[in-house]
Amino acid sequence: MRIGILTGGGDCPGLNAVVRGVTKSALKHGWEVLGFREGFRGFTEGSYIQLGDHDVSGIIIRGGTILGTSNIANPFSYTLPPYGTPEHPADLSDIVRDNFKKFKLDALVAIGGDGTLSMAKKIHDMGLPVVGVPKTIDNDLSATDVTFGFDSALTIATEAVDRVHSTAESHNRVMIVETMGRYAGWIALRAGIAGGGDIILLPEIPYREQEITDAVLQRRQRGKKFSIIVVSEGARPEHGTMTSSRIVKGSPDPLRLGGVSYKIADMLDRSGLDMETRVVVLGHVQRGGEPTPFDRWLATGFGVCAAELVAEQKFGYMASFRSFGFTSVKLEEAVGQLHLVSPDSQEVRMAASVGTCFGNSSLVKPY
């Protein structure tokens, strides 16, 4: 057999571990493995390398992806020259079908988040053999308990929250740490809980400005002269919208979130609290660097699981991790809806019970 591998969407720690897991498993079966460069761009434009044991040796500890990736190369709405532009995207479905024959592929393993796996599902709907692997630091894919990359991002975010404590306390400041996560608040929620954040603001729980101000004031009245706010980039006010930094034409999801922490800081500065406010936006530092041991372990398991799905010719499925074991689910289950934080979940109520403010007491009730 000959199989292809590609990594699509944003980069994240653990991608190389998956590539290694798939490749080493495939080689054990006696298969050939092609690695397509820059996600679906390489698959569409015919740019690939043949992967052998030497090529994947030692990459389990490396962040990023040796294959490269792209979050704008959608073969069903292609915006890259010479085939298309953002103004005139091209449907390259026929090229996708032709390339399966051209490269003599028996299967394609697509590693990515909601966007990449949605493309993989469309390719499978065309009658082509595809297997998916869930990847995103946002942890927002349904049909799996956790995605690789999340634990690494969470570790970085938690360390950042830990580190701002000392400067916040030394200067009696309000420190705001903004995390990634897009429409899901998992990174902010768990980094906020683990780092002892006083206020956590999530996309799933629209905040009230007055409740944030009151929480900071009440802490000061109790003799606590500093506060730590952990805010997800997708957080929004109760009667407002998410804060975007720019629009990227040609992207599957063109809205680029970011900057809500500065709005919170400005609101606090205008509130009359008479406290200095500082902002730390973590940004892409959460997606860089070496994967944590858990993400290396998880990504390896996903890679091996994907190879076994190919061996069983179980196409149209995604490798999944549930109840601390590896299994598989249909791609349509994985991309049907986002996995979001529930305001009445156990961990939200747990945090509220130790005094964490979520900016909206009508939605969050402690135990």
Image: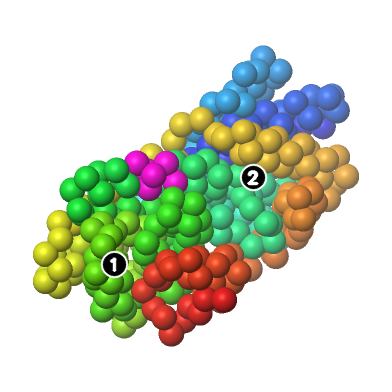
Residue at the image position 79 percent from the left and 24 percent from the top:
27
Residue at the image position 36 percent from the left and 74 percent from the top:
359
Colouring style = rainbow
> Can you tell which mark lies on residue 48?
none
Q: Position of residue 310 (x, y in %)?
A: 81, 42
Query: Type of residue at label 2?
Result: Ala
Q: Position of residue 21 (x, y in %)?
A: 71, 32
Q: Relative to 316, does residue 215 appear above or below in the rendering?
A: below
Query: Type of residue at label 1?
Result: Arg
- Within 10 Å of disc 2 (Cα), the crowding (few <14, some 14-19, many 20+) is many
Secondary structure at badge 1 equals loop
Q: Position of residue 360 (x, y in %)?
A: 39, 78
Residue toward you, 270 or 86: 270
184 drawn magenta? no
Q: Earlier along the polypeptide chain: callout 1 or callout 2? A: 2
Side (left or right) of 273 relative to 348: left
Figure quadrant of the C terminus: bottom right
Tag nearer the camera, 1 or 2: 1
Residue toward you, 96 or 187: 187
Residue 48 appears in view: no
Magenta highlight range: 158-163
Residue toward you, 207 or 86: 207
Q: Which residue is mark 2?
A: 110
Secondary structure at badge 2 equals strand
Q: Which residue is mark 1?
A: 222
Q: CA distance from mark 1 to mark 2?
A: 53 Å
Figure quadrant of the N terminus: top right
Query: Which image quarter: residue 251?
Result: bottom left
